């Protein structure tokens, strides 16, 4: 059964119904368009960082293969394998980019036969209060990085004096 990741935009607040209108479901699975048309798919999805990394990696790989004396068949095979990787990871790239930008947050995952069933299962659990939206991060740099008191211990032993 397919797995769907549920994402909610942070900019829409309000009631449960208003927030539900903007929730999206990303289906995990192979993307044929990302496999066949990787650069075009990255542009259409506005995944600019991934496009730059893909372009640099493809130029470097092709240059390396030519310098190694690999024929055109080997180069084509490597290109197909890289496209296959993008086809398999397309949904993860989209989810990463959406949450990295800070405009979306992940609410959970749903396993269902199709999108309609996934929506039904998720919203039933959401209305019942079984799905809690994660709280926005409130930690500051000062609360995360605390100076540690100096220890008299060197190495892996927790107490001075060595093993017991």
Image: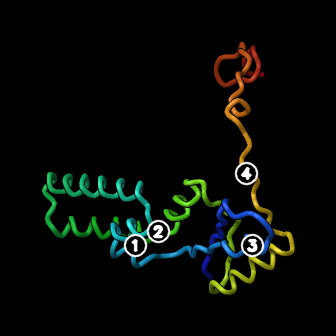
Q: Is residue 23 left or right of residue 81?
A: right
Residue at the spot of label 4 = 136
Q: x%, y% of residue 61?
A: 25, 55
Q: Is residue 72 left or right of residue 22?
A: left
Query: Are there few (<14), some (14-19), or many (20+) residues within 10 Å of tag 4?
Result: few
Residue at the spot of label 2 = 90
Pick whichever of labels 3 and 4 is earlier in the sequence: 3
Pick whichever of labels 2 and 1 is earlier in the sequence: 1
Q: Which mark, residue 34?
A: 1
Pick whichever of labels 2 and 4 is earlier in the sequence: 2
Per the model, the C-alpha gap separating discs 2 and 4 is 26 Å
Q: Pointers 2 and 1 in contact (CB under 8 A)? A: yes
Q: Residue furthest right?
A: 128
- Quarter of the picture containing the C terminus is top right
Q: Pointers 3 and 4 in contact (CB under 8 A)? A: no
Name the residue rendered at 26%, 69% in the picture: 77
Residue at the spot of label 3 = 18
Q: Residue 157: which quarter of the image? A: top right
Per the model, the C-alpha gap separating discs 4 and 1 is 32 Å
Pick whichever of labels 2 and 3 is earlier in the sequence: 3
Name the residue rendered at 19%, 53% in the picture: 63
Q: Secondary structure at mark 1?
A: helix
**71 or 105, nearer to the observer:** 105
Q: Secondary structure at mark 2?
A: helix
Pick whichever of labels 1 and 3 is earlier in the sequence: 3
């Amino acid at each position: 059964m397919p797995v769907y990741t549920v994402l909610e935009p942070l900019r829409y607040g309000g009631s449960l119904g208003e927030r539900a209108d903007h929730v999206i479901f990303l289906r995990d699975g192979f993307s044929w368009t990302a496999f066949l048309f990787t650069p075009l798919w990255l542009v259409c999805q506005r995944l600019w960082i991934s496009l730059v990394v893909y372009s640099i990696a493809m130029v470097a790989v092709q240059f390396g293969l030519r310098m190694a004396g690999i024929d055109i068949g080997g180069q084509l095979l490597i290109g197909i394998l890289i496209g296959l990787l993008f086809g398999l990871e397309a949904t993860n790239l989209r989810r990463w980019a959406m949450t990295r930008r800070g405009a979306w947050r992940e609410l959970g995952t749903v396993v269902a036969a199709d999108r309609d069933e996934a929506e039904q299962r998720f919203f039933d659990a959401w209305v019942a209060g079984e799905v809690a939206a994660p709280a926005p991060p409130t930690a500051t740099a000062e609360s995360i990085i605390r100076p540690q008191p100096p220890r008299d211990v060197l190495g892996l032993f927790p107490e001075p004096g060595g093993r017991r």
